[in-house]
Amino acid sequence: MHRSDLLRMTSVKKSYGSLVALKGVDFNLREGEVMALLGENGAGKSTLVKLIAGLAQPDSGSIEIGGRSVKLRSPQHSLEAGIAYVSQELSIVPSLTVAENICLGGHVHGPFWTDRRLAAKVKPYLELVGLGDVDPSSFAGGLSVAKQQLVEIARMLSRNAKILILDEPTAALSDVEIEKVLGVVKKLASEGRSVIYVTHRLGEVFEIADRVTIFRNGSSFDPVEVATLDIEQLITSMLGRRLNEMFPPRATELGKPILSLRNLRVAGMESPVNMEVKRGEILGFAGQLGCGANAVIRAIAGLNPVLDGSIAMDGKTVNHRDPGAAIELGIAYCSDDRKKDGIFAGRNLVENLTSTNLNRISPGGVISAAREKATAEQLAQQFNIRIDRLQSLAGNLSGGNQQKVALGKWIGISPSILLVEEPTRGVDVGARAEIYRHLRVLTEKGLAVIMCSSDNQEVLGLSDTVVTFFRGKIVRQCEAEAIDLPALMRDVTHPETNSPGVAA
Amino acid sequence: MISRLLIQNLAPIDAGDGNTFARRRKLSLAFVGIGILALLLFGGLTTPGFLTLDNLLVIVRAASITGIVAVGMSYITISGNLFALSAEELAVLAACIFAYFMGAGFDVVSSVMITLVAAVVFGSIQGVVISRGADPIITSLAFGALFQGLASVVSGNKQMLLGSNAAEWLGTGRPLGIPMQSWAFVILALIGWVVLKKTRYGRKILLMGANKNTAQATGLNRTLVVIVAMSVFGLCCALVGISGAAQFSRATATMFPGLNIDVVAAILVGGIALQGGRGSPLQAAFGAVFIALLQNYMLLHAFTSGQRMMVIGALVVASTLGYHYLQGKR
Amino acid sequence: MATTANSTKKFRHRVMSAALAAGVALAAPALAYADGRVVVFSPPSTDNYIAAWQSGLKKKAADLGYEASFIETTRDQSEQDAAVQQELAAGADTAGYIWWPFINAAGTNSLRSLSRTGKPVIFANQYPLEGTESLWTAYAGIDDFANAKTAAEMLLKACDESSTVKCDKGLIVTFPAGFSAGADRAKSFRETVDGKLEVLQEQPAGFTSQDGYKVGSQIIPPVKDDVTWVYTQNDSLASGIVQALTEVGKTPGKDVLVIGGTCHGDTSDLTSGHVIGTEVQGAYLEGWYTMQTLHRYLKTGVVKDGKVYAEATPDAPPSDEGDISRYNFIPSPPVGNSKEAVEGFRLWGWTMDELCNY
């Protein structure tokens, strides 16, 4: 029954500096199949895809196409080998017509062309992707995102691609649109093309994939036939076993409620939000990109406007409108992009750590060197930052230490609520445990933490209370003890297949 | 557009290896100082009368006009707002306002105060616009045209005579044998340095320049920082305008040609990073002195003006590239 | 289809009119003037010399029954070229053009366009380039060579008469580099003093007192024991030099003779004797005379070959009648450094204050 392997990769290794992205991976793709790639962020699937697309070169290992060894040195090489890559970020040029977009950089036309000739040339490709009704001379910018996605696929097809790589093509699409794209993918496979389909949505895997390759920590598992798989199995394979010791013990008792959201409506959430956070509690939001968790956090931080409902602190409605007001209220916010707005990369740690608290270190407007030093050293000790590194620039630290600085700077103002997005993004395992511990120590002193993360294990392991989000809706709100990882995973990726009775 | 180009060309620094980075930073601070010393030594060995106290005073005096404005401008650059290209026009306007009130019979102190207040207002208006997110270069160019026009209207495109020599000492006085402008220059540079390094406001400028987003996320008030920086700049322009008008007891709308470019050159030669968050007013001051030193050397050796322009242009290019390298970008 | 074409045309027409209304202000009332409209191209009047030049021209035009339309352009020659094209496209009735180019050589094409209209073109202020003779009717304005020659002669005379200084070495401080009048004057000055005085250094400075001081304060100290005279190209530069000399302990007028080439509003350096003399080169007068030249040509239609210098009579201005020449120069009479000389000065009925205060 085995169809022949179209693409085969053997013992492929790839490192970026000291970070090992692929530790000797095997991979194969058959003719006419849809192969799904699954794995957590950073597991290695994007790296693999980049190697196939010619966007990066492996350090060692071999790639064969149709039984012949190849070197894919550039995207151009890959295209010539029949491989087309549709990235997550669309490369559609909105100001060009559909036909022009399809022919962009290609060889569909000779040196001279007219709109009409161009339209005639691209028509078959549009039909292939189910866009037969789209006028080739309309502007691409006027199409929906899904249709743009399909135009992009049509563009790749126009290059006679035998292998199509789709990197999370449905991440930004609505349900109806997803159906459309998935339909096209199935059709293309049935016509003999091979598709590598990278996704986070488990449901899609069952819907369209023939086989699935799971990635974890830079290694790949042998491909599995989807027909023989169930969703529990899939999740277990994806996550493997993790060190539960990484997380500090949960809170033994919680204090009084400090913040409550009542019927809060914000852009990005489809339904009103009701929740409460207590002193000493870590409230964890789990969900994928665009699920609405960040929208809630940013509303509390004063960055997203409150459309309706209320934010109350200690029982009083505050509904503050800007970050400055939030800070006044004792609400500190660390975004998911610390380089952008969490640290001052070009200044030293002393200045970083005291930046939130200039008034304290400069009585009468003049900076007191003694106070500055004392404040910085106190925070550094609390966060386990080496005192002798206080004079180095924040930009020169490791990700973990930067995150400690980004968090630590807030502690100086003794906030009552700390909002953290992706507390350990880009932080190595050792520093992660340390950051979890620091957060727990802070809550033991009465601080409330609200964090959101796309790392489900982190949410589950660290939080006292878990809230799961899916596409602008809260799926469930419960004590962390009351939910296990597979259930949480389902909530954030695929709540429809959930067993009944869990929706909050 | 211009600013975007500048930013792209001097894009954020890749952190790289910590130690070399820190070392390079210190080096960049010393760079202009070394340049000045080298030029002094070279000039002294090759030019009679170059290394005399008198000539050094002359050089500092020649650097003063550019230097005073460059010190004011340094806060704008360090706060991450590149340049205000309205220095020339604001100085001209201040000179005309000063001459107007002197000519109308006001006493020196009142005229000075009125002019300073007006310049601070003009500076801070630009600050308000820039703090709303407008591009500082475009904004200041537009305001520069406005100021130039206003100066033309105030002066009626004629020379404005001060009517009396009461203010002359402001432009020609030499307390302890040192010209007023040089005193103002040195004192302002020192005050500017102390304020930047030792006060809360100075720290805000540095943090704002180092990372605007983080600064705002930590609750620093960008509007206030920019407005104060622009007001200081306005004040410095006014001092230059007043001393210029007082020196010859007259003002015209064509004074201070090329001041904008001279000031930018001083900032660049001084090595203040265009992306903000680093540098000090002293560097701007040293930049101005370095250029004046070189100009003086060339004047004494009777370089033609073409040669002089070429050398100064080459110096600006070389220092821009040099600092770029020193700041660790290949 | 027809309506579309029509409305497009209308639209174009409207755009055109708007452009004209903006570019050629005051075109409409031209017909109200008996002798028509004169179009004047010049750099911007934010420069005080040009402002005074324009006001002299405007006054004379009004006296003679013309309306002067000023088309000022800022920044560069291309903008001025665009203004010329707009003016010509407007097709308004024009008696003649006055052309003060931004950059002489670069403006030649626009000059050609103006000459093709068949209307007289009076070249103003900037000395016309060789080879462009067929493109303009006459030149009216200053003669930089004569101006500098006069200055040199005044200096030589003062040197002879001085009992306190023996003229020998000296400095020339000029208008900024690239400004052709400055180079012309320096050349003419050097030719006149050749063999009598030694030039230590010639440095471009600018136009203002600050510019004069900035250069003077640096080049004077090393040569302060040698320098006996300084030629500056206007009195603003001269006052900067006077200050720089004072600062090195010299008494201008006694130890060092300073001559200013062009008068300006402040006569205090003259009356105090710091500057030995200057020349009255009135911007107002130059504009006035340029307009008169155009008018005379329009009356007679004759241009005589050669150069003519208008006479520097104290009271009577030159006649509005008679043929013009190819080159028509205004006088720049010298003024000595006494209160009487300054106060008693008259040229064509104007006082020194009236002519120099701009």
Image (spheres, coloured by chain):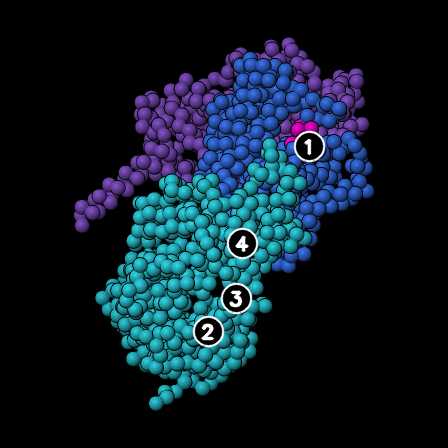
Chain colours: A cyan, B blue, C purple
Name the front one of labels 1 and 4.
Answer: 4
Q: Position of residue A414 (x, y in %)?
A: 52, 44
Image point 52% across, 71% down: which residue?
A21
Question: Pointer 2: what residue?
Answer: A240
Considering the image in quadrants, where does the N terminus of chain A appear? bottom left
Query: Which amino acid does the dot numbered 3 rest on?
Result: Glu
Query: Could you say which disc has been placed on residue A32 in the image?
Result: none
Kindly report the secondary structure that dominates the magenta region of the rendered protein: helix
Q: Residues within 10 Å of mark 4 (few under 14, many from 20)?
A: some
Name the side, left or right, on which A141 lies relative to A419.
Answer: left
Whether marks 3 and 2 lie on the same chain: yes
Name the front one of labels 3 and 2.
Answer: 3
Which stretch appears magenta? B181-188
User: Disc 2, disc 1: CB below 8 Å?
Assistant: no
Q: Chain of mark 3?
A: A
Q: Is residue A452 visible?
A: no
Question: Pointer 3: what residue?
Answer: A245
First in residue order: circle 3 vs circle 2:
2
As drawn, C310 above or below A40 = above
Using the numbered discs, state the Cα–Cα distance from disc 3 to disc 1 in whole angstroms.
Answer: 62 Å
Name the side, left or right, on which C352 lies relative to A449.
Answer: right
Q: Position of residue A365 (x, y in %)?
A: 59, 34
Q: Is residue A29 visible?
A: yes
Q: Chain of mark 4?
A: A
As drawn, B256 above or below A310 = above
